[in-house]
Amino acid sequence: MSDSPPVAAHPDRVTLLAFLGLVLIGGANAIAVKVTVQELAPFWGAAMRFAAAGFLMLVLVAAMRRPLPRGRSLWGAALYGVVGPAAGNAFAYVALHQGVPVGTGMVLIALTPLFTFGLAIAQGQERFHVQGLLGALIALVGIGVVFVDQLSADVALLPLLLCILAAVAIAEAGIIVKWIPRSDPFATNAVAILVAALPLFVLSWVAGEPRALPIQAATWAAVGYVVVLGTVALFALYVFTLQRWTASAVSYMTLVMPLVTVTLGAVLLGEQITPSFLLGGAVILGGVYVGAFLKIRPRRSSASSLPECLPIDASAEAEPEAARA
């Protein structure tokens, strides 16, 4: 039996502040990653991040005496870590390293809920719904607008496609979690993140990347951010918010975080925001809303677009929401 507050449809001030912190920290993650890849090789930077964050999370799990996943849950957590945090971040880090603006990357990764629905249908977890198809078609128009805008700004096509692949990997990780038995979400995520570091280290070695510690103070600050705030604190805040608010409400962070990233990218990194990019980004987020969040059908999944977090409805704390559905 959990001692956490009951899940509320109308959040109190603390819950709203937690949700705001979740959005701000998650929205700034891409900014910090962009800073790290300016000095560190992408696979190496991602491997360092998840090795350190996974170790810290396991220490917290031990301190809180949370049970580690076992059996199928353990293997499922490991597979989730390879497909979601590892593959998703491998694609995203390389894309940012090769010049994709952080705002563009975050908007494209926000497609994760739509990919989740498509993959869930293809793998027999959900039935086909016209609403999902309509949302995908709307988002496809927005993707076309964003791609044309970025290609005209001399952003290469391949890194843009890598952002799409990152979203697909994160979405597939959400499908994987639904096939495995539930276990403690914090411990499961700790195992997944630590496991994710292993294939990233292997990719760094195979790619012949330079594997050295950062020299610049800004890089150290960015690494510290993505490890402590952008991974460990982000997930803790995520679970805290889920304990106090409905999963469907918390899942709206998917639509809000890209707005934070685009704004911070313009202010802190000087990235250009063109009217056509704003239009395309708005259409993409509108498509995601229609396909994944608009309350037309009675039962629908909620999926986080964050590779640092388990999908929302894979967390045990989201059960009260499912019980009311």
Image (cartoon, rainbow, N blue to C red):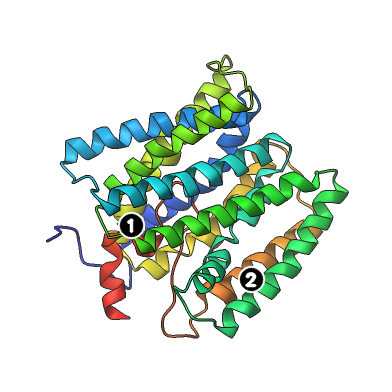
Q: Secondary structure at mark 1?
A: helix
Residue 19 appears anywhere in the view: yes
Residue pointed to by mark 2: 286
Residue at 31 percent across and 74 percent down: it is 322
Q: Identify which amino acid the numbered label 2 is placed on.
A: Gly
Q: Secondary structure at mark 2?
A: helix
Left or right, 226 with respect to 111, comes to: left
Image quadrant containing the N terminus:
bottom left
Among the 4 quarters of the image, the one containing residue 180: bottom left
Among the 4 quarters of the image, the one containing residue 255: bottom right
Q: Is residue 99 placed above or below 106 in the rendered structure?
A: above
Among the 4 quarters of the image, the one containing residue 91: top right
Left or right, 201 with respect to 234, comes to: right
Left or right, 257 with respect to 72, comes to: right
Which of these two is toward me, 83 or 144?
A: 83
Residue at 60 percent across and 27 percent down: it is 206
Q: Position of residue 30 (x, y in %)?
A: 58, 42
Q: Position of residue 256 (x, y in %)?
A: 54, 59
Residue at 63 percent across and 22 percent down: it is 208
Residue pointed to by mark 1: 241
Lower position in the chain sequence, tag 1 or tag 2: 1
Which of these two is toward me, 187 or 222?
A: 187
Q: Is residue 306 placed above or below 289 in the rendered structure?
A: above
Q: Identify which amino acid the numbered label 1 is placed on.
A: Thr
